[in-house]
Every structure is written in structure tokens, then in C-alpha cells.
Image (tube, rainbow, N blue to C red):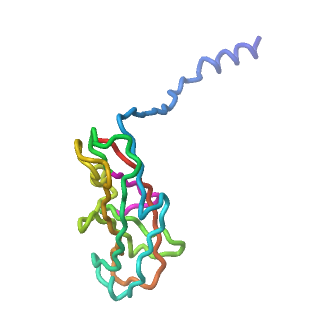
Amino acid sequence: MKKTVIALALIATVQQVQAAEVKFIGEIVDETCSLEVNGVTNPTIMLPSVSKKDLSAIGQTAGESRFTLTLKGCTGAEATRTIAASFLPNGDVTKDGRLANEAPGGSNKVSLQLLDETTPINLASGELSRVTLVEEGESTQGVSKVLGVRYYAEASGLEATAVESSMQYSISYL
């Protein structure tokens, strides 16, 4: 009898904990496209070696490399919505939206800055971390966009270091 009373008392004191929720969101669109960077899906963009003297003060940039995003295989010849490339860093991002240096043993005094032509892309901000490729009503054929990436001095006193980072890219239909 005592065991039954104790068991009932324990059951009565157990509190209901609200379960966490997973939400799935998708969309069916009129058209689909894919993206390539320099003609491949998973490219490696090589930046030139630069002297640490070129990045001796906070905010200095050097060693820009250009690469091309190309819209491929669109099911519609004309965009029914704005099509953009969206970027999502795989690692840390600086407070100003640059890719943190993820090289093993690499310095945090240097980051990588992504550019739309000459305008920095802020990867810490949702809307600013995408680049419009095609506006609604425009042709989806032969669309490409040149972007850039360069070293950015986060602090003075930078020593020689390896620099490495990565990001994912995808198509957004806006």
C-alpha cells in the first residue's frame, strides 16, 4: 500500500514540459534555376599572397580575387519573381559581416570581405547577404554576376598567417 501511495504522489508531482517544435517551410515555384561559381558547383577561390605590410592598419584591404556567379538551367525564359543569390557563412562572421578566418591556427586579425562589384556584402544581415541576379520580368538566359573577395585587416599587428573560410550559396526567389 505504501509503495502505491508513493508512486501516486510522484506521478502527481511530475510537471508537463512543453515540447520543442520543428517547423518545416517550403515553396512550390513557377520556375527553378541553379547556380555555378566559375563554372562549377563547389569551387575553391584562391586569393593571392600579400605582404603583412599591406594589412598593417585596421580597415585596410588587399588581395582581391574575382569570381563569377552564373544562373543555369532555369525552367522559365523570363523571371516570374526576383531571383537572388543568398549567402550563408559556414563559420563565424565578424560584427560587420565579414567571414572570420577559420584556418587552423590562423589569426583573428584578418577576415575575408565579400564584394558585390565594389560594395561590401554584409553577411551578418539577412537582406544584405544576398545579391540580386534577375528582376521580375527579365530574361533568365545568360545571367551572370561578378563578385569579389579580399583580405580585411581586423586589427593592427598582423603577422604572417594562413587564411581560410567558406560559405554556402543558394538561390532565393523573392
Q: Nearer the viewer, residue 31 or 113?
A: 31
Q: Is residue 91 a member of the stretch shown in magenta?
A: yes
Q: Is residue 106 a member of the stretch shown in magenta?
A: no
Q: Position of residue 75 (x, y in %)?
A: 38, 41
Q: Which residue does the image show at 44% across and 62% down from the upper left?
A: 39
Q: Nearer the viewer, residue 107 or 46?
A: 46
Q: Which residue does the image show at 45% across and 76% down from the upper left?
A: 107
> So how many labels did they put on this image?
0
Q: Nearer the viewer, residue 32 or 169?
A: 32
Q: Which residues are magenta?
A: 85-94
Q: Quadrant of the N terminus?
A: top right
Q: Quadrant of residue 52?
A: bottom left
Q: Quadrant of the C terminus?
A: top left
Q: Quadrant of residue 159?
A: bottom left
| Figure check: 150 above or below 137 | below
Q: Position of residue 72 (x, y in %)?
A: 40, 51
| Figure check: 98 above or below 32 | below
Q: Which residue does the image show at 64% across and 17% down from the upper left?
A: 9
Extreme residue in the top direction: 1
Q: Nearer the viewer, residue 77 or 41?
A: 77
Is 160 situated left or right of 60 in this image?
A: right
